[in-house]
Amino acid sequence: MRNIIDAYLIGDSLAVRGPKHRLLNVPLKALSSLRDKPREAQRKFEIDPDGSFLYWPDLDVHLGWNQFLQAVDPEALRKAQQRSEGFNQRYGAAIRTVREAAGISQTKVAGLTDRHVRRIEQGEVRATSKALAALAAAHGLDANAYMEKLAKALK
């Protein structure tokens, strides 16, 4: 686990000390969830007791070490994007497998266009909770039962 040891604001940057005492100076403008917030709200954060994340209670924002690292290190961001793309492709393939096994066409998923279903299945976009609920309903399943089917298809 990547633990945050300390954090403080310096000018327009957030200084975050993490693993092996590495210090990141993260420009606030690089953090979309904090970028346009009032300065007073940006100042009011807490470090999670185990150092997993910083938390801004007034903004309901949680940011962990990896998010700070990705904000300042293009290589870390690229690797995270590749992991996300790979996950989307595997998850989309599982959604397609389950849908085809049930004999449901892409056009029969109420609440989603066939184009949206296709983009999810091809891994172009992440399946949101709304999309997963629509897919579960198309299968006549509740969300938990549908997710169990997807988990089996992912193995």
Image (spheres, helix red, strand yellow):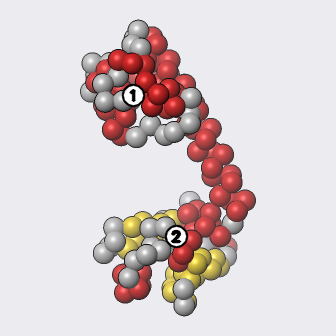
Horizontal side of 124 relative to 44 (left or right) equals right
Which mark is drawn over residue 113? 1
Name, please, the residue furthest toward the bottom: 11
Residue shown at 44% from the left, 37% from the top = 127
Return the x and y of residue 66 as percentages of the image width and height: 58, 62
For residue 94, the mark is: none
Picture coordinates of residue 83, whole percent (x, y): 63, 45
For residue 31, which numbered disc appears in the image?
2
Q: Is residue 3 visible?
A: no
**In the image, is residue 47 above or below residue 95?**
below
Q: Quadrant of the N terminus?
A: bottom right
Label 1 crowding class (10 Å Cα cut-off): few <14, some 14-19, many 20+? few
Q: With 140 as the anchor, is 146 left or right in this view?
A: right
Question: Is the residue 89 above or below the residue 15 in the image?
Answer: above
Whether residue 127 sits left or right of residue 83 in the image: it is left
Q: Amino acid at mark 2?
A: Leu
> Mark 1 or mark 2: which comes first in sequence?
2
Query: On the image, which quarter does residue 49 sit in?
Result: bottom left
Task: Give above or below for 92 relative to 15.
Answer: above
Identify the residue shown where x is 70% and y is 62%.
Answer: 74
